[in-house]
Every structure is written in C-alpha cells, then in structure tokens.
Amino acid sequence: MFPLVEFPELVQHYAPFFTDVFSADALIEFERYISGLIVSENKTIDGINRLFVGESRNQSSLNRLLTKSPFSLDGLNQARMNVLNSKPGTRLKNDGILSVDDTLLIHYGQDFEQIAKLFDHVSGSYVWAHDLVTLHYSDNETDYPALFQLWKPVELEKLEAGLRSANISIKASKETLKITDPRKWRGYLMGVWQRQQKKHPDLQSLYDSKLIIAQELLQSWYRDHPDLHLPVTFDSWFTQPAFCRFIDQTLHLAYVGTLSETDKINLLSGQITLEQFANRLKEEHLAALKNGGKQMFQKNTIHFKGKNEIYYSYCKTHQIHGFSKQRLVINYTRADLSDTPTFFISNRLFWQANGITRIRRHRWPVEVYHEEAKAEGLDKYQLRDFDAIQRHVALVAVAYSLLRAAQYDSDLHIKLQRQLKIILEGSPAAWRRFSKAQSLWCLALFLSAGLTQGQPLQKLMDPLIHAMCPS
C-alpha cells in the first residue's frame, strides 16, 4: 500500500460529526485510525501508523487511542448514528428490520483477555476466538450495525457461588469434574443455571450469555427509539422459547425466528418433526397438482434490496413444541419443491407468508456485514486488553458506516467526482476502493507540486520510502 500524504476525503468529510467525542489530539488519532481501516491492507496499529507521511507520529500515540483515550463508546456510537441519519438513504425508516446474529473473531493463541475456545461452524472445529453479538438494522436501501457487544466467558467460581447462595443444590458426584474434566463441569453448572432461571430470575445477573446480551441490546435500542416498532429476526440458534417470549411479552414486538427440520410440531394426530411435516405437505401438494386438488404451497413474491424473489410457501398457525402458538411458514424456492425447505415462525398469527419471508430475508445483511467488516479489520487486532478490543470493534463499525453513508452523500460525490472522474456508486467495498484511488490521486498531486516547485525527486521520495520501509 502506498503512503498517505493526507487523510482521505471521506474521512475529512465526516470528521466534524465526531468533534464532541474526542479531544483535539485524539480526533487526529481517530482520523488516522479510520483512514487506515479503510485504505490499508495491514489493519494492525503498526501497519496503520506506517501509512502516514503528513501526519507521521509515534505508534504509541495511535495505541493510546485504543488503550487509554477516555472517549465514550456510547458517544462514539451516537455520533456514528448521527452520520447515518444525516442522509436520506441511510436514515432509520419505519419499514426497517432489526436482526440479531453473532460472529467469531478468531485468533491463533490465547494471550488475549476474555478469549475462549469456541466451536466454529465453518471449520467444524474449536478455535480461540472472541464472540461478537450484533444488532443490525436493514431496509431496502441500506443496512448497518445498530448496536453490538463482545461476549465474555462465564466465571465458573462466580457462577458456582451464586448458585449456592440461592440454595440451589449442586450434585456432590459432579464436583470431581472440576479436576477431572473442567469442560464437563462448566457444562453441568451452565445447565443448572439455565434450568433454574425461571424460578430464580436473579441468577441471570451471574452471567451474560449471548441471549442475554441480545436482550440487553434490544432493550437499549427500543429505549432510545420508542417510536420505531421494528420487527426482529434471527437464526435458529437465537430462536429459543425464552428469547422469543422476551421479545413478545417484555418488548411487545413482532419477531420472525428460524427453526430446523428436527424441531417438532404438535398436531392432533401427535408430535412429529418439521421435516416429517414438510414431507407430508409436499406429498399432498404434488398429488393435488396431479389431480387438481387444493395445493398446500402457494407462489409468493417478495421485494428485497431492489429485486423480486419467488418462493413457494405454506403458511398456517400451529403449536410448535416448546413455544406458544406460532405462525409457521415453510418455504421452497423451486416450483417442484425439490430443494431443501426452510422453516420460519412468528408471533404475529395474522401475518402471511410473503411478509414473514421478507422480514426473515433481512437477516442476511448482518452476515454480509460481518464478512465485510472483517475486510476492514474487525478480527485483525493484536490488542490484548479487552476494553481496547471493544474500542477497535466500535471504530470498525464507524469505518463501515462512513462507507455506507458515502453511497448517499451528494456533497461528497461532487468533491470526489472532480478528482476521480469516474462513476461513484456501489457497495462499501466499492467505496473503500474509491477512497484508495482518491488517496493515490493526492499522492500524485503531492509529487507533482513538489516537482513543479523544483524539488529533487529524491527529496520528495525520501519520506515516502521511509514510511513504507521503516528502519
């Protein structure tokens, strides 16, 4: 990556939104860090620090932004949302949807605070990672993280003491697991904690599980946005009875969850799996097509991100095992029902398949965000301190949000169009490339101006070379 002789125009354009969050010196470090996250290939503090020529500083200054600068994460997040709400395309809308998801920030080694050995569904193995829980906003024009929080592993000693103080019995036969099999001991205590929460609500304070973090993020969001009654959607891991009851009975909001083929449905004829139920409906549907009877799956069209998508859907209210009555949707994407079905549930018993499917479709952007944010350095940190890692995560969200806002910012388009002479549109990844191109243009102007003033090329290149190849 070539050196930066000034901050990218995109960063300079949005920096005024953050003047109340940082001191004057910290604001410069903020601009340096965001610039590096956007244009640098090396997202570490050292890699970002080496980019700059015009704002060349000791690496420790940038490091202090993450480890010691007293800026407020809440203030930073509010400033980020102010940027997004300043543009019609990224403004919060009444037809928006919130989704809940988590992602692993994988590292090789365990010398990081609060890191844990977690199962990675992609590799099918256990890895050392932090786990980030995200509440994501999406509508047909845009999407971005609304709130987020890093999960912390349970403190077993605290958990055990809390259970005992609540007079909850712990089997003496299990206590040997502390020494012989710590993982099973952890699993046993977690199971006791989870089963006893209904009788002892105070136990919840002993440990913030991913579900509890998601609940707290939702509570915080709707406390700050009481007039936005946006539905919430999530995958099968978060589709658990207690979490759904919380959204329905505490927040009084609509949700669309996801079930697997092994989840069970209660019928008058008995209890069967959703896979068996879908196969039964499929047989009836195909027979009806052949004989002219009532078809079980209806063709539905939904509008998502500017495109129409077609599904073949079954929609009816059912009793799902472990849940109250739910509106159940079973979707196929092929007219002959030859693909694998998906199963969605909602607490809105009057909703139809196209509405439920459309809401559930808006869960996908959070997955895209996690991948694109990793391209911006979400999991590239080398920081050991947990608070510093949380600040890094928050700054990555800022970088991503600026790229989102830029898509709908006509004033910024005009500034960049004068320099780049290209069509400015596309995804955050495209705007990252535009920022790199604009920085390259600034470097060319720097060299051209120096040569015009009669400076020797070697003198102009020395600081650039030293920035790229430090001693």
Image (tube, grey):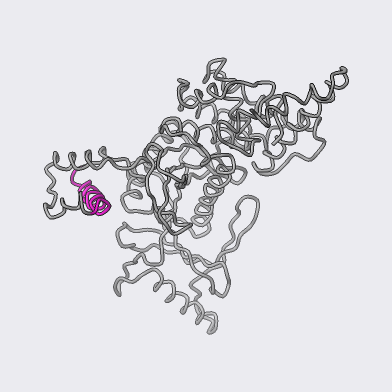
Range covered by the magenta-colored residues: 181-201
**Left or right of residue 127, residue 165 in this image:** left
Seen as rendered, the residue at the extreme top is: 24
Q: Residue at x 77, y 26 (%)?
A: 461
Q: Is residue 234 visible?
A: yes
Of residues 451 and 377, the one nearer the viewer is: 451
Q: Residue at x 68, y 28 (%)?
A: 467
Q: Residue at x 30, y 72 (%)?
A: 268
Q: Quadrant of residue 90?
A: top right
Q: Quadrant of residue 409?
A: top right
Q: Main secondary structure of the magenta part?
A: helix
Q: Report x, y in % for residue 239.
A: 38, 54
Q: Residue at x 34, y 62 (%)?
A: 320
Is residue 76 highlighted in magenta? no
Indicate the quadrant containing the N terminus: top left, top right, bottom left or bottom right: top right
* Residue 257, above or below 84: below
